[in-house]
Image: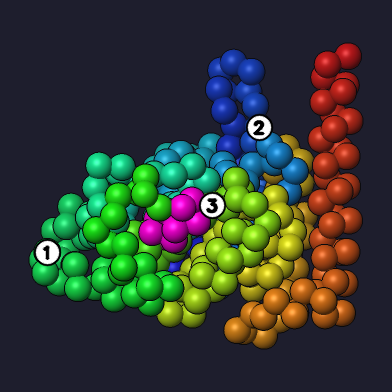
Amino acid sequence: MNGALSIRNAGKVYDPRGAAVEALRECSLDIPGGDFVAVVGPSGCGKSTLLNAIAGFDRLTAGEIRMDGELLTGPRSMTPPGPDRVVVFQHGALFPWRTVLENVVYGPLRQRRLARDEAERKALQLLRASGGLDAVAAAYPGQLSSGMQRRVEILRALMNEPRVLLLDEPFRAMDTVSKTTMHGHLLDLYALSPRTILFITHDLDEAIYLADTVVVMTTRPGTIKQTAAVGLERPRLPAMRQSQRYLALKRDIAGSVHEEAMKAFERGEREQA
């Protein structure tokens, strides 16, 4: 399956001629095509820096990232963003002046990849499959709940048929009930349209429940501290959150993240002293 990512000794230094903030150091990770990988770690550990490098928003200063063997970024080159890697950010990015349907078909029409009739037909099929969102196809984003807006954003990303879907804390601002509902919708979409997903989150329950693999990053400069195979069957069911496997995995990952969070806290205190 397309969408395999190979991250080799990735490094990123911001402002190398000034403060030289090292965000990533010798970060290496392999993600098979079609896998759902969640990345967790303390704030400022480089999670979003890694995602931005994969997306083509930022160039590495060391190492390389490849997708299906093709170089995406390294110190001397960077493949610009494209429909093969689509990002959904934590802050909404729907066009408020366009309807739901117009938002979802925007990518394929802008790229001239689909005729309007074909794009609208495909979009309505996706909207219908995502809990009946075709019923609000003519509505504007401001008329929708935050959860419905998130679903539309993910569907808009899937309309581009990306090899890799990059999700940067898309449910962070939601309450627990809304977030749980969105987990179900995302899992349904993943089953409907499997592809590589890299999911950035601070929520360990979210990471374990959704992903095939949970990756823990160290405090800055970020590197890979732990890679944990989730090992839960799909489809995921809420009852799995009470299983021995789930609870043991959560304890293990929580301990690993807590160690890094304490390092970040102590370093912050020393920097202020």
Q: CA distance from mark 3 to mark 2?
A: 25 Å
Disc 1 marks which residue? 116
Instruction: Tell me which label, 3 or 2, sits earlier in the chain.
Output: 2
Residue 132 is left or right of residue 182, and the answer is left
Crowd class of label 3 (few under 14; some 14 to 19; many from 20; radius 10 Å): many
Q: CA distance from mark 1 to mark 2?
A: 45 Å
The residue segment tinted magenta is 145-154
Image position, residue 130 (x, y; %): 41, 72
Residue 168 is left or right of residue 226, and the answer is left
Visible residue check, residue 162: no
Disc 3 marks which residue? 170
Q: Does residue 13 lie above or below 69 as drawn?
A: above
Q: CA distance from mark 3 to mark 1?
A: 28 Å
Disc 2 marks which residue? 22
Give the quadrant of the C terminus: top right
Task: Name the residue: 64% across, 42% down.
Answer: 46
Q: Are marks 1 and 2 in contact (CB under 8 Å)?
A: no
Crowd class of label 2 (few under 14; some 14 to 19; many from 20; radius 10 Å): some
